[in-house]
Image: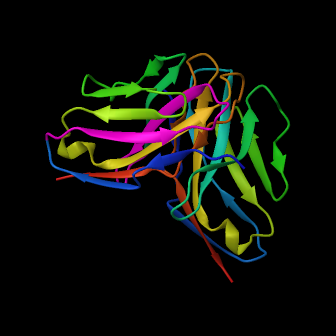
Amino acid sequence: EPEVTQTPSHQVTQMGQEVILRCVPISNHLYFYWYRQILGQKVEFLVSFYNNEISEKSEIFDDQFSVERPDGSNFTLKIRSTKLEDSAMYFCASSEASGRAETQYFGPGTRLLVL
Amino acid sequence: AQTVTQSQPEMSVQEAETVTLSCTYDTSESDYYLFWYKQPPSRQMILVIRQEAYKQQNATENRFSVNFQKAAKSFSLKISDSQLGDAAMYFCAYRSNNAGNMLTFGGGTRLMVKP
């Protein structure tokens, strides 16, 4: 069964550094998402992406964040200048469409630690 | 804004027994979707079951069923004949039908299954 994959599984970085988290959505899916979960807190929506542009974003997704689909398979989340509070598990998800009750399929996550 | 609350951080059940996980939500909308996701240790979240708010009939998927009480804004998950493989983190999630595709998650319930 097709799965969403994410790399790396773990990333350690220094505060102020740029990080790029990578995701490969399911191949025939058209909608892509990023969520994050700070340790001990809820999973939070960051951004959704469709047709090469952001379709929805949360208040968390400020100018330090950007997303891109650089080729036909990858979907990336970039954090330009990481802060300590960016330490979290980042989940990528994809869905085939945005219709009623459309299922979002999640990747295993990237654990980001900012020191 | 919608909120989702899972009041049970941890639950345990004996193998072959039945367990119910609680979820309540707060919304002013009438058209929305509710989901239960399962996240086994070190694995991605997978959809267990979903419920459309306009449907009065409770959703069922094999051993998994929900008790959807729209007026009470309650959406509990019942797992019958619990198996060791059911041990996981369970997340309740809400999605509006009027405000994009973002999922709003509860804090999760860790389910342990005792042999």
Residue range (magenta): A16-42
Image side of residue A24 versus residue A84, left or right: right
Asked if residue B72 shows in the view, the reply is no
Residue B64 magenta-drawn?
Answer: no
Q: Which residue is drawn at 82% across and 29% down?
A: B55
| B84, above or below A24, in the image | below
Q: In which quarter of the image is residue A43?
A: top left
Is residue A30 within the magenta segment? yes
Q: Position of residue B94 (x, y in %)?
A: 59, 34
- Residue in the foreground of this view, choosing between A113 and B73: A113
State the residue lying farthest toward the bottom. B115
B72 vs B83: above or below: above
Q: Measured from the top left, where is residue A37 in percent x and y?
A: 40, 46
Q: Nearer the viewer, residue A26 or B65?
A: A26
Quarter location, residue B115: bottom right
At horizontal 33% and vertical 26% (from top left) the residue drawn is: A66
Identified at 33% across, 29% down, the residue is: A60
Q: Which of B39 and A12 is in front in this view?
A: A12
As displayed, is residue B69 above or below residue B48? above
Count how many numbered circles sit on residues in the image: 0
Q: How is the image coloured?
A: rainbow
Q: Is residue B78 left or right of residue A29?
A: right
Q: Provide residue B63's location: percent of width, then percent of height.
A: 82, 59
- In the displayed structure, A53 sits above or below A89; it is above
Q: x, y (%) of residue B20?
A: 69, 59
Where, by quadrant of the figure, is residue A85 drawn? top left
Residue A55 visible, this orientation: yes
